[in-house]
Amino acid sequence: MAAKVTFFPVGNGDMTLFKTDRDKFVLIDIHVRKAADDPDDETPDVIAQLKERLPRDAHDHPYVHAMMLSHPDKDHCSGLETHFHLEPIDEYPKGSGKIIIREMWSSPIVFRRASKEHTLCPDAKAWAAEARRRVKLFRELGYCAEGDRVLIMGEDVDGKTDDLTAILVKVDQNWTRIDGQEDGSFSAELLAPLPAGDDDDEEETLTKNNSSIISLIQVSNGNVADACRFLTGGDAEVAIWERLWDRHSDNAEQRLGYDLLQAPHHCSWHSLSWDSWSGMGNDAKVSDDARSALGQPRDGAKIVASSKPIKDDEADPPCVRAEREYKDILTGVGGEFVCVGDRKDPLEYEVKPGGLELVKKTETARAAIIGVTAPALIGARPVGHG
């Protein structure tokens, strides 16, 4: 089945699913508003929409092969405890319908930085606890068992991840495995969270600019290895993008070039500028370096704002001035800017050999994943991480 990227309608929040050409499903962030769980409310039931697309194991449990939490803000992890199973597989609550996360992609340094700025919400704390449980299990056993896998995105401080090299992805490194196995149609490069070294001022800057996992994900279609290059970066703000441009400007097309960009921080002006949009309006200046880092579209590229509808006002995010900049970035490449906005159905693209094609009618899960069934996880033999 062809690779797909799906953006769910979650307002100012992120919830993105991509499926590889080899039928591996990876979820990036989750934002389930309380109204979305109310059957009498018109807010889209994004969990039902997600489950429609997911495979099920031999016990009929829905699962994702991997889930990445870009950072622990509430609008990127709300609904996690309610809808996902966060304990050992053999403790799965019968009849709960919760989604199993076979492999977590998590960053301890992002959590550490976020906790300096604000108190983590219960869902964020639940994610962190489950990631710690899986890391502890890896340290005890020396491998990641089925349903307990974890990848660490970026090194932690003070050598805390030095003994985790088998499950650690360092900045500027590439990884090609999903759920402990080579996919063959997927690769990704970790661009951030950036290390600060011994510079306290640099660490403070990275912390205050919404340190997030930033990755350039490449999925293939048939014989086209880079049919889609998807750049996603959570809520990373201007200082992060400036530093990425400083690191990669000499090879920007390869390191930052994209077919699909998820506009960071829900199309916020603060990913493009140090100035306040509400305070300065059109006098606010764009950071040339941040714009350059985010301005590497390939022919026909799409930029997607996972946000509320964008209005011509002082709101931020989403910000109308940021929308204008992104549209300008796409000038000359035949690209398109799209806001998920007040859609009821997910925004879904299929990865074709010649580029991205909008899926105009939502497909149901059973049509999309015929023949995709996982072996039972309960009682399965442990498999090493490799």
Image (spheres, rainbow, N blue to C red):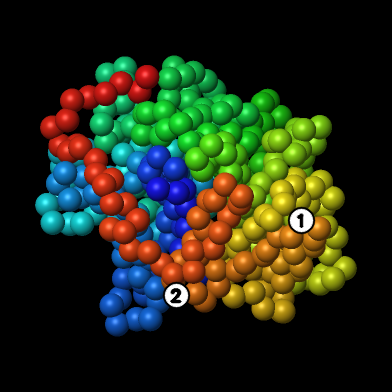
Residue at the (46%, 19%) spot, across then down = 165
Residue 35 percent location from the top left of the image: 37, 75
Looking at the image, tell me whether mark 2 or mark 1 is earlier in sequence order.
Answer: 1
| Residue furthest to the right | 283
Q: How many marks?
A: 2
Residue 30's place in the image compared with 252, above or below, is: below
Residue 380's place in the image compared with 59, above or below, is: above
The image quarter containing residue 367 is bottom left
Residue 43 percent location from the top left of the image: 40, 76
Q: Is residue 129 visible?
A: no
Locate the C terminus by quadrant: top left
Describe the element under mark 1 as helix, strand or loop.
loop
Residue at the (35%, 70%) spot, across then down = 45
Q: Identify the mark at residue 333; answer none if there is no mark.
A: 1
| Residue position marked by numbered label 2 in the rendering | 344
| Residue type, numbered disc 2 | Lys
Task: Determine crowd level at label 2: few under 14, some 14-19, many 20+ residues with C-alpha closer than 10 A.
Answer: some
| Eye-nearest disc, 2 or 1 | 1
- Quick check: 271 left or right of 12? right
Q: Is residue 162 visible?
A: yes
- Quick check: 100 left or right of 314? left
- Quick check: 99 left or right of 161? left
Q: Identify the mark at residue 143; answer none if there is no mark.
A: none
Residue 180's place in the image compared with 277, above or below, is: above
Describe the element under mark 2 as helix, strand or loop.
loop
The image quarter containing residue 163 is top left
Residue 97 percent location from the top left of the image: 20, 57
| Residue type, numbered disc 1 | Val
Residue at the (52%, 20%) spot, across then down = 159
